[in-house]
Image (spheres, rainbow, N blue to C red):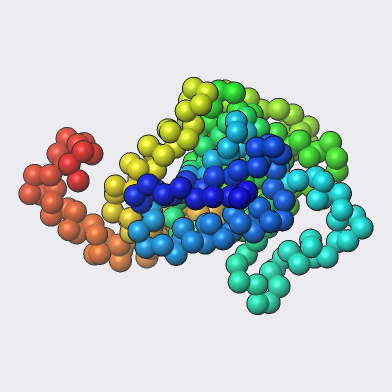
Amino acid sequence: MAVRVERAGRVWTVVLARPEARNAVDPATAHALVEAFAAFERDAEAAVAVLWGEGGNFCAGFDLKHAAALAHDPRPLEALAWPQEQGAPLPRGPMGPTRMRLDKPVIAAVAGAAVAGGLELALWCDVRVVERNAYFGVYCRRWGVPLVDGGTVRLPRLVGIGRALDLILTGRKVTAEEALRIGLAEYVVDDGRAREHAEALAREIARFPQGCVRADRRSVYAQQGLPLGEAMRDEWRNGLPVFFAEGAGGAARFAAGQGRHGDFGDL
């Protein structure tokens, strides 16, 4: 199987398992990724997902052997036209889940190559844990293949327009150290440790009251591009129901003595 899911409590690890192709995504793999994340979203017990590539690479992008065939038969791409065809059960990009809007966080555990569509998969995730040997790049620049899985949208929002244009126009290699410096990665860890670190981070997030986690995450994405006043009004409307559902009880536990002095171990 090109995609499998490994569950540990409330944390799901979605594994890209095409190491012979450096985890490049073909149409069947894209479909399997969508199905895996849709199942994660539906499962009431699942809280945080990790996306990891087996065999030392995160993802080398869309499988260009399949892309070459599209020159003679474009119908598979036409089926992915935006907006989705009527009746399509789930939004799907060429790389799979890049058009999905989950209500739960996903962490990318990146080793080796995260290039072209693989970069776009990493950008779709909320947080990126990157091994020292990892690298990013718009490597599809060489072949005239555009970014159509969110790369021109999410990259400038993450690193700024100037840096995004530098990476997009040149297609150059971005090391883990540079990725951390410019905001393309949140953590850099030793080689072979990205999955372990990402899963530990996922377990920590999964410990918290999930209504609040998801509400704050939702607000971060919803405020992009809004005027300050409108964004703050929406933040209030988004958060207020969660306060009554979770926050008031949490405040009462704090008042009774729990969690003093920043103690995250006593929840």
Quick one: 188 or 219, which is closer to the camera? 188
Residue 170, horizontal then vertical, whole percent: 78, 32
Residue 258, above or below 244: above
Outermost residue toward the bottom in this view? 87
State the residue in front, 246 or 21: 21
Residue nearest the viewer, comparing 96 with 261 = 96
Q: Quadrant of residue 82?
A: bottom right
Q: Is residue 101 visible?
A: no
Q: Is residue 189 above or below residue 236?
A: above
User: How many dots with numbers?
Assistant: 0
Q: Residue at x 39, y 43 (%)?
A: 202
Q: Is residue 226 left or right of residue 149?
A: left
Side of 205 relative to 18 (left or right): left
Residue 127: where, in percent of width, then height? 49, 41
| Residue 72 in view (yes/no) | yes
In the current view of this chain or complex, which residue is farthest to the front? 1
Say which of 40 and 103 sits in front. 40
Tell me where residue 252 sits by quadrant: bottom left
Q: Residue at x 51, y 48 (%)?
A: 14
* Position in image of residue 159 (x %, y %): 60, 37
Residue at the right extreme? Answer: 72
- The x and y percentages for residue 96 are 64, 55
Which residue is drawn at the image coordinates 24% and 64% (left, top)? 244
Q: Residue at x 14, y 39 (%)?
A: 260
